[in-house]
Image (spheres, helix red, strand yellow):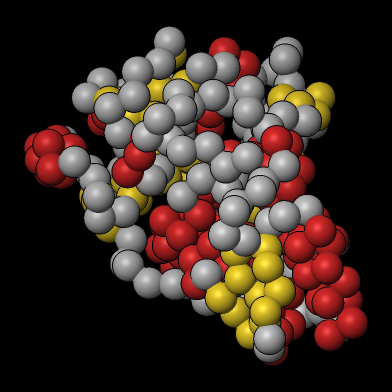
Amino acid sequence: MLISERERTILNYLSEKNFSSIHELIKRTNASQATLRRDLDRLEKNGLIKKVRGGAMIAEDNKIPESMIVFDPSSTPYDMQQPFDIRMHNNVRKKMCIAKEAAALCGNNETILIDGGTTSYFMTKFLKNSSINILTNSIIIAYELVRTNNKIVISEGIITPNNMLILDFINKNPFSHFNISKAFIPVEGFNFHGPISSDMFHMRMKSSLIAQSDSVIILLDSSKFDRNGTLRLCELDQIDTVITDKDIPSRYIELFKAKNIRLIIAKEETPQAI
């Protein structure tokens, strides 16, 4: 793991558990004891954690640097201009559970699309031992899986640093020659008209890939329901499956049932990544 990835792993785990032993953090980061202690020293210096006997815990005064502020989705409008590293800290546990359910739908030797997003990013944690043809427009998803048995195909275009995507501003579908069995599409929001998007170029690519795929699987945590957006990503009848968490508003359960959309409620647990 890179240093930044180890720190994210440590912070995410401590956010869920509040306290962890040194031994458990070593297992989760696959780092040496010396390396982990240096990470903890750095995080404590930045006010993010507090080292205690035998382990570490989240700092009580929660002195988080401005560059790493975790936004509360209930009080802060969703903004795709927020850097990926900030957005990925929102609702981490729910995203991990959703990602685990999504990864369970993937079969070896399939050709799937994983569209870039913070929820779909966590799918990589459960696909390390798979052997799948994975198309993606996400540089961070490609990076996480490039040293596995999966075959990774990335799109061409310009890297957009805020969302870690590769976007082609000329050709709307970089994977037009592939037969895609399943497309895993994270979305910014969802209302009764369908999933929404705020970025014209990303929406254009998503829409073409949705039309091309045999099965379209929408990924979103429950905080994203009832959001409005400028652009509609696709029609409800183009969606095969929605994966979300138990806090989904009941009216959407009825909507999906009426529209014959399969609904998967992610199990409440702490998923163990591969």
Give the camera-side residue of 38 and 235: 38
Q: Which residue lies furthest to the front in this view?
A: 61
Give the camera-side residue of 182 and 22: 22
The location of residue 121, given as percent across then percent down, is: 60, 51
Q: Quadrant of the C terminus?
A: bottom right
Q: In this view, does 138 lie to the left or right of 110?
A: right
- Can you say whether 30 is above or below 258 in the image? below
- Can you say whether 97 is above or below 247 in the image? below
Give the camera-side residue of 44 and 225: 44
Name the residue located 72 percent from the left edge and 55 percent from the top edge: 47
| Quadrant position of residue 143 | bottom right
Q: How many numbered marks have been drawn onto this rendered protein structure?
A: 0
The location of residue 242, given as percent across then percent down, is: 32, 46
Name the residue located 83 percent from the left edge and 77 percent from the top edge: 37
Whether residue 24 can be seen here:
no
Q: Is residue 218 left or right of residue 191?
A: right
| Quadrant position of residue 170 | top right
Name the residue located 67 percent from the left edge and 46 percent from the top edge: 64
Q: Is residue 273 left or right of residue 240?
A: right
Give the camera-side residue of 29 and 203: 29
The location of residue 140, given as percent across then percent down, is: 74, 48
Q: In which quarter of the image is the N terminus?
A: bottom right
Whether residue 38 can be seen here:
yes
The location of residue 81, given as percent across then percent down, is: 63, 23
Name the residue located 81 percent from the left edge and 24 percent from the top edge: 158
